Image: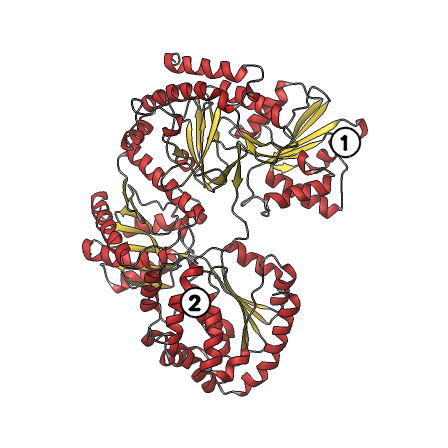
Amino acid sequence: MSGPDPDRAQIDARVLAWLREPDAIDADPAATEARFTELALALFAHQFEHCPPYGRFCDGRGRTPTNVHDWREIPPVPTGSFKELDLRSFPAERVVHAFRTSGTSTERRGTLWLDTLELYEASLLPTFHAHVLPDLLERPITLRVLAPSVEEAPDSSLSHMFDTVLRAGGLAGGGFDVKQGRLDIDGLHRHIERARETGDAIALCGTSFAFVHWLDALAARNLRFGLPEGSRVMETGGFKGRSRVLERGELHDALGERLGLPPERIVNQYGMTELGSQFYDSVLRRPREPRRKLAPPWARVRVVEPTTGEEVPDGDVGAVVIVDLANTGSIQAIQTADLGRQVDRGFEVIGRDPGAEARGCSIAADAMLGAP
Amino acid sequence: MNTAAVREHLAGLQAAQKTLHELPIEARVSAVGRVLDAWSDAGSPVRVRLLAEHPATSGLSTENLAAGLELGLRRDGWGHAALEGLVEREAPKSARLAGVTTVLHGGVIPMPTLLDALAPLVLGSPVLAKPAARDLVTPRLLVESVAELAPELGACVAIADVRRDDDAAIDALLETERVIVTGGDDTVTAIRARLGRDTKLVAHGHKLSVAWLGADANLEVSAARLAVDVATWDQLGCLSPVACWVEGDAERARAFATSLAAALEAREQVTPRGEVEAAAAARIASERSDAELRSAAEGVVALHVGSTWTVVAEGDAAPRPSPLHRFVRVHPVATLAAWRTAMGSLRGHVAGLAHAGGSEADALELAQSVGASRATAFGELQTPPLDWARDGLGVLSALLA
């Protein structure tokens, strides 16, 4: 296997250097605008050349490295396209890992091909620490994960993320509590009881639907836990097909009620398999400010009018587009399937109201398109 | 409307049932027939009001609503005579339903709303109707027209405008003898779980329609006709085709896609598309980008985009997501057998099949193979008669069963 493309190696080195700078996560995005733009444009030129479908796609839109001068002009690819196309900017023989979107065995699943995990891990750690464990150095914290381990789910980016956090150390203890596809409720309760005995804070992190299953079990057993001071919850992802569907606020209310946690100790993570970076609620990091999602300085979020792609004014609803420098091996500009709005130098993701009525009696065909 | 108001309405309707049952079925048919005659007359005051008031809540354009009503709500298929024929086929003279029927309307298309509320009245059951969120107009006008044109039934139909998060009021609504619901699978499942053991449920889930273009069909003519099926109701109806399979090679499918694009642009001039919510607009943009990217990658996908419509000529027969609002995929398929295989994941979710070319027998066989309850020529999908067995359920017989 030949070595990495020299241009790419240089871009990776520069992005990694940024991600590993102490306090990089605290930088004001405005202060790093020029640095971000320079790297994003260099990465665009690289991906334009080394991912031929993407290059032709951009060319078709009249956007090329010679006429794109602002990261906002970089054409984004929809997340759905990762289901059918190999959107890689490196040769197939350099693949070292693949993350896949969740789904059943018959569903078409999106794949993020990786030739290195270094950027992914370098991005996730400071972001997770800043938003979920900002007080890690001040107190011992145990981390329990309501998701499968990497051994059980090697293609899950979420499992890899938690594994990386656990391996990074600094925690009082931790581990995975989904085993062989099932939440080990009794095991989880033992860990919580142990934390209650020692008085150490516990961070419960995992998928939203796993928390719903756990809440249902707690309700069935009529159980409530008063978690130790400093404890917190981080939940992520959707529910559809995995548990009953709750609005995010309902989930947080139920968690707060069962676990004795105030709202500012419950954090939602917004992330997706197709992205190397993640976005978290601001409440643990900036408890006195309104809840919104914050991006690390090496990722930028635009909220655009879906048809024109033009940015909408702050506060207006539009489609969420992300440019993420940690995506050096695939495509950095991603058009998500979510609606959101920019607020207070962060953003909110607006989920569809699970009870909202459709205007028609027709059904969008993806609802039943299991098989490719 | 709160729980107490729902119970008050129900008490009134239960009291009215005695009067309703005293009417022979011929009298009930005659009364409902007068209402249907008015609704199926494009010049009637109720149709004029429907056209004036409906678009503001439904988001459909006035022109599209007018065209949809003209196609779907015709005197010959929806008037008194059509009702008499339906009753003769589906209801014995002695047919009489006990108790009140709750109708939970869904969607913005007036015809199913009209029929779901009137069918129980024909069979002697008073109706409590919860309007769909985006169509408050049709149920209200229906109640008014019953009061005016069929006063003997005036006390037998009422509206319950209950908030969908008011669990107590919804539970009170569901305490009737039977419930008719139109909605997505999640809605139907949630309603079913809340019903008492003795309550009968007639559920109409969300479905879609598809089109088949046979090898001997004319492309230009077929495209113009299919554009009518697609544009009517902005593809929001279960009889709206979301994709067309073209018998032959990819080149023929691409040629049809080009014709269909031109036809949809022409329809836009006559029946403009209505409102598109941000979420739907985002899905359309995403699917357009995806097609663009696959075209760049594979070279076999072609994308046609207008200001309000999208046609994607696909390279294969595999169904793909459809964000609706005039977004159509055109697939090549070599044989009928290959089409049946491709339709595997959609089987059971198909309401209608439009066909061009081939024989009627072929079309019926195609429709049966995907479980469609309606098969028509291109351009006629949106004209279901009063007695169309939506989801295979007879209009009256499903209530009597």
Instruction: Please tell me whether mark 1 sits on a helix, a strand or a loop.
Output: loop
Q: Disc 1: which chain?
A: A
Residue A254 is situated, as x and y percent measured from the top left of the image, at 68, 44
Who's the residue at 39% across and 66% down the image? B52
Label 2–label 1 contact, CB within 8 A: no
User: Quick check: can you spot residue A194?
Assistant: yes
Q: Is residue B225 above or below residue A306?
A: below
Residues beneath discs 2 and 1 located on the same chain: no
Q: Amino acid at mark 1?
A: Pro
Residue B126 is situated, as x and y percent measured from the top left of the image, at 55, 77
Question: Quarter holding the N terminus of chain B?
Answer: bottom right
Q: Is residue B2 above or below residue A177?
A: below
Q: Could you tell me how far apart the alpha carbons at marks 2 and 1 are, in whole angstroms?
A: 56 Å
Q: Disc 2: which chain?
A: B
Of the numbered discs in the image, which one, if any, rests on residue A228?
A: 1
The quarter of the picture where residue B290 lies is top left
Q: Which residue is mark 2?
A: B112
